Image (spheres, rainbow, N blue to C red):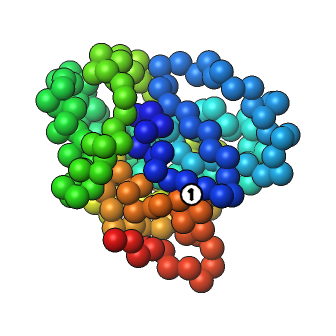
Amino acid sequence: MDQNPVLHMKSETFDVLTLWDYTDFECQVDFQELFPQYGSCSLVGWSMGVWAGQKLFSKFKSHLSRAIAINGTLCPIDDDFGIPTAVYTSTQEHYSEQTRLKFYKRMCRRKSILDKFILRQPQRSVHDQLYELAVLKNSVNCLPGRDSIYRDILISTSDLVVPTKNQVSFWQATGDCKIILLEEAHYPFSRFDNWEQLMEMWLPGLPSSPEHE
């Protein structure tokens, strides 16, 4: 991905920094300088970004007031706790313009969501995405759940990319986290108009599934 699938989510509360492309972890942002400029900072990881967020920010855990994991685990390529290995390998080996669209359909499931996503799709080439898939296949590892920096977990009930049952199995085993099940597919962001709607889901007394047209 890149920043485009979430650009529609505005905010009057937060400055939003979006990170993507995990072919390497040499980040252009100096977090040691960035964090002191804010009273509080939150991390939101989505899909493979959950694992990447753990890798990048575990050493900055004390600077994070919250960490939210959305449709991902710390074992992102795994038959029991992530994307099944055969599915990931098949996606990588057959990735093309045509299969990319099929992948986006699997991410969104409903046509109404897919239509919105296509307007917000990443502005990356197939070659660029394929290179990242290949690098991740060889570099991804399974990080221990007991070390997780995430406490707020959002799992879509119709996730065909990172199977819902695999996510539930992983996060239930970690124990100390709050899980919300959302009736969405792997890409849940069309449900939200702004970051506040997402960040407030775990507040006491609020419904776990916000109404949205």
* Secondary element at tag 1: helix
Residue 130 position in % (x across, y down): 31, 20
| 103 on left or right of 61 | left
Residue at the left extreme, as displayed: 98
Q: Quadrant of the N terminus?
A: top left
| 32 on left or right of 180 | right
* Amino acid residing under circle 1: Trp
> How many numbered badges does the structure rendering display?
1
Residue 152 visible in the picture: no
Residue 209 against residue 58 in the figure, above or below? below
Q: Quadrant of the C terminus?
A: bottom left
| 48 on left or right of 33 | left
Residue at the bottom extreme, as displayed: 205
Residue 200 lies in quadrant: bottom right
What residue is rendered at 37% in x and 29% in y? Answer: 123
Residue 21 position in % (x across, y down): 47, 26
What residue is rendered at 39% in x and 71% in y? Answer: 212
Residue 126 lies in quadrant: top left
Residue 176 against residue 44 in the figure, above or below? below
Residue 181 position in % (x across, y down): 42, 67
Residue 117 position in % (x across, y down): 31, 47
- Residue named by callout 1: 195
What residue is rendered at 35% in x and 18% in y? Answer: 128
What residue is rendered at 46% in x and 46% in y? Answer: 6
- How packed mark 1 is, by other alpha carbons closer than 10 Å (few <14, some 14-19, many 20 or more), is some
Residue 67 against residue 85 in the figure, above or below? below
Residue 28 lies in quadrant: top right
Residue 69 visible in the picture: yes
| 29 on left or right of 207 | right
Residue 21 against residue 5 in the figure, above or below? above
